[in-house]
Amino acid sequence: MGLSSAGGTGGVGIDDVPVRMSWDRLVADATAVLVDVRTKAEWSYVGIPDLSSVGKKPILVEWQTFPAGQVDPQFAAKLDGQLTAAGVAKDHEIFFLCRSGGRSKSAATVMAAMGYSRCRNVADGFEGPLDPWRHRGAAGGWKAAGLPWIQT
């Protein structure tokens, strides 16, 4: 499965990258980073990707606040500060992850507009789409792919 591209706002296109390919690139490229834009509640109760086997940690920055669900107007500034502090250059590959791929696509688009040139959306996110029983985590996404994750 390869990359697919979909347009974002402001003419910025963001590639959708399958979860397994995202993992492979995080492993292969020491400068590649994963940004998880879900809420604190999701990180606490659903889990987070575990990158410790490759000597990395995901960068955790909420795109929207819980329970209000409003986009954090300081998101770009907060993430830019964390990326800068972590030594992430604007040309490093950055993978954005959320529950199923929607919020992360929006977040990647905003950061691409700020000059981060290699923003990618992790297709199907951490939990993937709903399965026939209306549950997440089995039909697609990071968890369903068997990629490492931890419960906090």
Image: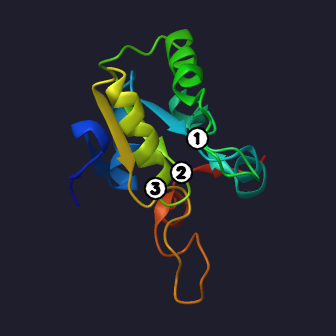
Does dot 3 land on a helix, a strand or a loop?
A: helix
Q: Quadrant of residue 60?
A: top right
Q: Residue at x 62, y 79 (%)?
A: 135
Does dot 2 land on a helix, a strand or a loop?
A: loop
Label 3 is placed on what type of residue? Gly
Cα distance in 3D space between marks 1 and 2 = 9 Å
The N terminus, quarter of image: bottom left
Determine contact: label 2, label 3, CB under 8 Å. yes
In the picture of the structure, the residue carrying the numbered disc 3 is 102
Give the x, y percent position of residue 96: 45, 41
First-in-chain label (1 vs 2): 1
33 left or right, relative to 112:
right
In the picture of the structure, the residue carrying the numbered disc 1 is 63
In the picture of the structure, the residue carrying the numbered disc 2 is 98
Give the x, y percent position of residue 61: 62, 33
Q: Quadrant of residue 52?
A: top right
64 left or right, relative to 96:
right
